[in-house]
Image (cartoon, rainbow, N blue to C red):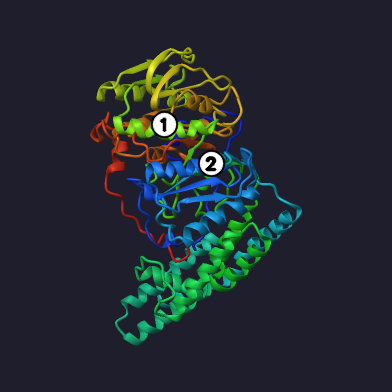
Amino acid sequence: MPHRSRSTQKIGHREGARGGLFALLWCWWALMGVERACALEADELLLIANKNVGQGGTLAQFYAEKRQVPAGRVLELNLPITEEMSADVYDREVVPVVREFLRSNGLERKVKCIVTFYGVPLRISARQNTAKDREELAAQQGELKQLPAQVEPMVMSMEKAAAGIDATFQAKAGADLDSQARRAEAALKAITTQANKTVEPAERERLLRLAVEKLAALVGPAGMVERHLLNSGTTTQPTSQASTQGVQKFVEYRAELMRLQDRRFEAGARRALREMVRENSGPFEFGRLLQSQIAYFQTENTGAAFDSELAMLWWDYPRSNWINNPLHYGVGVAHLPVVMTMRLDGAQTGTVSQIILASLRAESEGLKGKVVIDSRGIPAMDAKGKPDPYGMYDQTLRDLADLVQAKTKLSMVLDDRPEVMAAHAVSDVAVYMGWYSVSRYVPACEFRPGAVGFHLASFTMVTLRREDPRCWARELLNDGMAATLGAVAEPYLSAFPRADDFFPLLFTGKLTLAEVYWKTTPMSSWMITMIGDPLYTPYQKNPALAVGDLPDRLKEIFAEPRKTDPSGTGPWKR
């Protein structure tokens, strides 16, 4: 994960890291580069409410009016009224419904941020498999195990053809699907390279026909059309007016794949998907589909924050543990779209309306007040001179304090004693960052309207509705803070944004709250949720920190986006 070495120590008692991604090729964003999210605007929002909690829809309309969000951007979903929902209900009532709403309204590329409102569950529970699920899983695992043996003759045939026309060609080693893909790619390259060197037109045509023949066996008719689109530099999705029958069929094929994938919670849809891909897209794509469907049945550590999971709306991936956030500034460009998510929520509906109004006022007037940093005084290195994970995170608080003191005119209070600051220790607070009181909220600050901050600890957002001494997020909002983040379950220390990443970006006034959070939070499909107005820019009117005074790693955020090759690493991979 980005900067994982800074803070890998878990907070609780579980360990793990997200396994491999199987983001399927029929996401059309795979055919082109995806722009970095920046300058988030009101017409790039989708507002989601629970139709079974009427107050949430009312608050969404209130927010839309205040922020001038375009009409028709409030989507009400059929969700439980509890703070936790099952993975099955999420798959049935959220993913396909939101995808279809965006597609049918032409918003799948327009909406960059989804905002959830009071009444939408906070958390998705871990997946539970039925007996039939386990039976299907075993069958898929068996089929995947047998697939390399079926592919091997086709790869060897391509290698034999390559060796027949290029005496220097050496076949690569490996018998698993990934190795076979690399071997086939090397053989294909040898054939096409020789064709391009040939000056005799007839011989060149023969070699190219040979390459096409061998390639078609491995990628299928749909794969051939897709490869043609990629090689021709196509940067827009084909339509029903496409000029060739082959492309037209490909468009229809991809549309049906997306429809079936949206309903992957149904065994019949999964079966139909396998049949289509096996017939049309070749063994490598079929193998990736099997991997994806096998991953769908994973159960270990598959619970997550609703909002963090929703960010991966367009992805198909194993949900066990986390995904390194593709929008993090250290990652670069995501080749599949990630939707920023934010939440407007609280213990009562009045809390939400107050967040909205306080944010608007502070943004208009410029947020004023003290910066409070409650460090713990833990050295970055332990007694043996080795990095201490807790000390490394604590150092980010001290680095933030140094930056505030050296480069801003903000009034700052730094407490680096081991214990948490005492109740009512500081008044007139605009920004707060502290840690680590797991079992008890301490009201150390009196906040200015529009205040932003968070307390790093486990379980700080396990509930917003009921009283719980662990729930710092709930109480910070109750005490007047307008934006905070928290953990809906055990998150691990490395899941939180670094203090010296999050707050310096906020101080520049160049990015909205949603952008600040999503450029600095290390993980998605995991346990952290951010509450606040996504468009809130508290220091826009009076920037507290110049971009030029940011640490070098953060200055890159404001540089020109890096150019990347959207076609991936070969004809069978993205």
The residue that appears at 53% across and 41% down in the rendered structure is 56
Could you say where residue 245 lies in the image, as x and y percent from the top left? 45, 81
Secondary element at tag 2: helix
Q: How many C-alpha atoms fall within 10 Å of the one at disc 1: few (<14), some, or many (≥20)? A: many
Could you say where residue 100 lies in the image, as x and y percent from the top left? 52, 59
- Side of 192 relative to 143 (left or right): left
- Side of 289 relative to 31 (left or right): right
Residue positioned most to the bottom: 202
Can residue 315 be seen here? The reply is: yes
User: Considering the image in quadrants, where does the C terminus appear?
Assistant: bottom left
Tag 1: amino acid: Arg
Can residue 170 be seen here? The reply is: no
The residue that appears at 48% across and 68% down in the rendered structure is 184
Q: Which residue is mark 1?
A: 498
Q: Which image quadrant is residue 413 in?
A: top left
Rendered position, 450 above or below 2? above
Mark 1 → mark 2, Cα distance in angstroms: 31 Å
- Tag on residue 56? 2
The residue that appears at 28% across and 33% down in the rendered structure is 550
